[in-house]
Image (cartoon, rainbow, N blue to C red):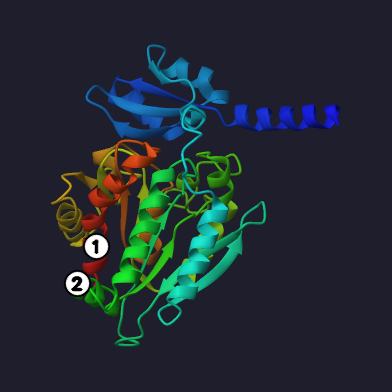
């Protein structure tokens, strides 16, 4: 028994260690930043330079490019050890919540299973359709927990889902909002990494695992491929992918600083500015608001589906103190409601 326990502990430690990710501050030339962006994840624009995530196994390669990079965090996942007593949802809690919403609001909801994760967890989408104006309503999709360590995104989305459903027929704005659209909510895109509190799934960053114009065959992450297949069966004209952190609202392109074609850039720029009006988030194109980011959901859905695809980074922490969740919900509400209302 002791031998088995030691083996399990060793395996758990090995999995954790292999997923260890360092955070660095980089302030260097634009040429080197392009090289960094092609190999690593530029996640935030700082007052001086950028924040970059680097896998433990790639640290030597990274430091050869920028030997003077400043280490910000030796392991970005250490936060979960520090805040282990908090009551953030696990996947079973999310599953129970979704089943409860379908039961309590069965007239206007339908829980869909569109696949399963590598570890056999169901991939869920909750369809919200009030059946008013049937056949005339636009379809939109709102997702969170593409990165499994961004726990606040799930808390915010499920809280607002409860609010929308409980206030339907009582609040005029919400009633009009729901009657005018069909909304698919996917609170956990990546259940396995969400359960592990990890950014990566199957050894990859899932929001760098989508195809993009320069690499149309990119993609080897199962949950992302399942989500792409799910979207192929729908006509989504809008998608909102919720991440944490940075207080940003952004639109394509992420893989290039070139703006989208025609009037698309103007339309999406106006949308993100409107969404940022109340919470004062920074708003703009992904590649110019943060930096180059190749393989993102926003780029894929805009490129392949002509979707008005928006990515947001809510709050200042992936896992704020549990007592602060209502504050982040309040900060996010108007932004998300305005996104929904923008599709007529």
Which part of the image, by quadrant, shows the N terminus?
top right
- CA–CA distance in space, label 2 to label 1: 10 Å
Q: Which mark, residue 173? A: 2
Label 2, residues with CA under 10 Å away: few <14, some 14-19, many ≥20:
some
Residue 297, position in %: x, y? Answer: 41, 53
Q: Quadrant of residue 271?
A: bottom left
Q: Which mark, residue 337? A: 1
Residue at 50% across, 46% down:
206
Q: Is residue 189 visible?
A: yes
Residue at 55% across, 52% down:
91
Q: Is residue 303 visible?
A: no
Residue 64 shown left or right of residue 191 in the figure = left
Residue at 40% across, 51% down:
155
Q: Which mark, residue 150? A: none
Is the Cβ of the residue at disc 2 closer than 8 Å to that at disc 1?
A: yes
Residue 59, position in %: x, y? Answer: 51, 20
Q: Name, please, the residue furthest toward the top.
A: 68
Residue 49, position in %: x, y? Answer: 27, 24
Residue 315, position in %: x, y? Answer: 29, 41
Give the number of the mark in front: 2 or 1: 2
| Among the two numbered marks 2 and 1 on one chain, the one whose residue lies closer to the N terminus | 2
Residue 80 shown left or right of residue 325 in the figure = right
As drawn, 330 above or below 203? below
């Amino acid at each position: 028994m002791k031998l088995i326990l030691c083996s399990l502990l060793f395996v758990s430690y090995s999995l954790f260690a292999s997923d260890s990710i360092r955070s660095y501050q980089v302030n260097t030339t634009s040429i080197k930043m392009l090289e960094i962006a092609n190999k690593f994840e530029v996640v935030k624009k700082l007052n001086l330079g950028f924040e970059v995530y680097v896998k433990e196994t790639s640290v030597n390669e990274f430091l050869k490019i920028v030997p003077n990079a400043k280490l910000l965090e030796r392991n970005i996942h250490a936060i979960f050890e520090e805040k282990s007593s908090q009551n953030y949802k696990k996947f079973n809690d999310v599953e129970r919540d979704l089943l409860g919403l379908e039961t309590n609001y069965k007239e206007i909801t339908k829980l869909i299973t569109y696949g399963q994760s590598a570890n056999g967890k169901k991939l869920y989408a909750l369809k919200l359709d009030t059946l008013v104006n049937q056949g005339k309503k636009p379809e939109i999709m709102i997702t969170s927990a593409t990165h499994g360590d961004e726990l606040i995104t799930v808390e915010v989305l499920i809280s607002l889902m409860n609010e929308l459903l409980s206030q339907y027929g009582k609040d005029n704005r919400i009633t009009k909002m729901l009657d005018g659209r069909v909304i698919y909510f996917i609170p956990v895109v990546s259940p396995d990494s969400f359960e592990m509190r990890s950014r990566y799934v199957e050894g990859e960053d899932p929001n760098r695992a989508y195809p993009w114009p320069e690499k149309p065959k990119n993609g080897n992450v199962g949950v992302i491929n399942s989500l792409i297949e799910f979207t192929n069966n729908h006509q989504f004209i809008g998608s909102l992918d919720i991440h944490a952190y940075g207080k940003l609202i952004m639109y394509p392109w992420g893989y290039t600083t070139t703006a989208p074609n025609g009037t698309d850039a103007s339309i999406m720029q106006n949308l993100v500015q409107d969404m940022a009006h109340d919470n004062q988030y920074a708003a703009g194109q992904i590649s110019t608001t943060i930096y180059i980011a190749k393989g993102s959901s926003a780029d894929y859905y805009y490129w392949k589906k002509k979707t008005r695809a928006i990515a947001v980074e809510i709050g200042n922490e992936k896992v704020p103190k549990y007592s602060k969740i209502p504050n982040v919900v309040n900060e996010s509400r108007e932004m998300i409601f305005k996104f929904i209302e923008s599709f007529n």
